[in-house]
Image: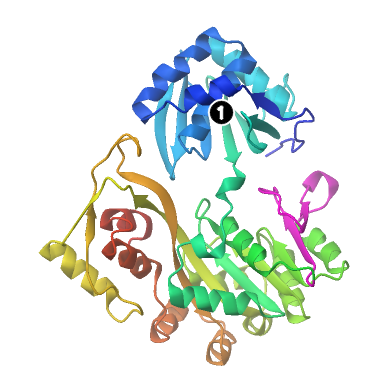
Amino acid sequence: MNASSTAGKTEALQIPESVSQGASNIQAFAELPDFLKDMETLNATQGLSLLLAAALQTRASDVHLETKDDSAEVRFRVDGMLQEAGSLSPKSYGQLLSRIKLVSGIKLNVTERPQDGRFAFRPGKGGAIEVRSSTLPTEYGESVVLRILDPKNLVDMGKLGLREDLFALFEEEIQKPHGMILVTGPTGSGKTTTLYAFLKHIQSTEKKILTIEDPIEYRLKGISQTQADQSKEYDFASGLTALLRQDPDVILVGEIRDGSTAKTALQAALTGHLVFSTLHTNEAAGTVSRLLSLGATAANIAPALNLIIAQRLVRKVCGCAKLRSPTKEEQEKLQKALQGIPQKPRILQVAEIQGCAKCGGTGYLGRTGIFEGLQVDEETENFLSNSPSSAQLKTFAKKKKMTTLYQDGMRKAAEGITAIEEVERVAAS
């Protein structure tokens, strides 16, 4: 995409206390269309404040403004799922779009190509929250997505949803002085949140931690963060090379996308640095094949890797759900999935989804992670040195008794944390 990455230069947009308080009265998604109707009578600045306040109240991670032939549809992504929030007239949407572009620092007169920007807003008396904005030309005009980067979403390791054995494994590995830890999964699976939690856990005055990200999602206190910028020839590969000259102990590379980044990151892990990064693969077993396809060699991959993690996010059931004993079919499904895994629940209780005002009638409130982790010990390193395929590594991981994403999810379903159907939606076996 030919897009601008310049963030807005204006100070944080202040949402009036009255607007924040008004949004706090929203009890269910069904109330959003009526709440957002006021946008038709407000100026663009007031309308944007109303939209952002409603998004915060409903815990939306993204706001989608999608142009149609005679309106603009508003949808909020909450707990990973899109929910209809209302619609705007073309006139009202046009004014709102101009305001979003202005505060985002992107060009108002450019409508035929995508643009990216950034701005901040301050809800009531709260601290500033950053927003990433993205425009896209469509058949009926420009559509917009606003990604809300609420610092409240930054969590400690203890709140990632790790079971005890994985928490102990991850804690052991992130304390090592060198090597590479890769977190894999699709977009939106919580990889960056996990890596930030790792950095917060190991941060100390004795360690120099540097990052290169695209873009910087959250500001981390006491950590030097840099942002990749293709227009300035500062990409992950060149940026990582520059970071290595800064005498770091720990490096976070936002994503390994190409061969140069992969090779430099592996070399950094082999030469005394602890390297965190992400990779787009569906499961831990696909990691080595992906690195090989990027041009890395097995001779470097095997000794550099310390830990491979795959993860997904599943919705947690709301407190309105009822716990009950599983049916015969559910019990068979759970027992099959949980066979041989550590810390198996002694009592199987599954959630029966209900729905209330608090969860907007969905039956779910918040999300948690499900994980699989493959530690690269001596045996695994020897196996990886032979450039195994994804299928071969998957078989090897089973022999090592690695708990899969599906098994970890079903364990949470058996404890009533999530639902069986939610695990099957996210991580079908």
Residues packed near mark 1 inside 10 Å, few (<14), some (14 to 19) or many (20 plus): many
Q: Could you say which is closer to the camera, residue 68 or residue 352?
A: 352
Outermost residue, left direction? Answer: 328
Q: Position of residue 425 (x, y in %)?
A: 33, 53
Residue drawn where x is 34% and y is 79% of the image: 341
Q: Where is residue 75 in the image (x, y as percent from the top left)?
A: 45, 30
Classify residue 4 by image quadrant. Answer: top right
- The residue indicated by pointer 1 is 52
Residue drawn where x is 32% and y is 47% of the image: 318
Type of residue at label 1? Leu
Q: In the rendered view, does 405 fall on the left or right side of 227?
A: left
Classify residue 195 by image quadrant. Answer: bottom right
Residue drawn where x is 73% and y is 70% of the image: 265
23 drawn magenta? no
Q: Could you say which is closer to the camera, residue 287 or residue 166?
A: 166
Q: Can residue 86 be seen in this view?
A: yes
Instruction: Note whether 147 is above or below 96 in the view shown.
Output: below
Residue drawn where x is 51% and y is 10% of the image: 40
Q: Where is residue 160 in the image (x, y as percent from the top left)?
A: 50, 61
Query: Which quadrant is the N terminus positioned in?
Result: top right
Instruction: Note whether 328 is above or below 374 in the view shown.
Output: above
Q: Could you say which is closer to the camera, residue 407 or residue 234?
A: 407
Outermost residue, right direction? Answer: 245
Query: Which quadrant is the C terminus positioned in?
Result: bottom left
Q: Where is residue 392 in the image (x, y as percent from the top left)?
A: 45, 81
Q: What stretch is highlighted in magenta?
A: 206-235
Q: Which colour scheme is used?
A: rainbow
Tell me which secondary structure the magenta stretch mostly adopts. loop
231 drawn magenta? yes
Q: Is mark 1 on a helix, strand or loop?
A: helix
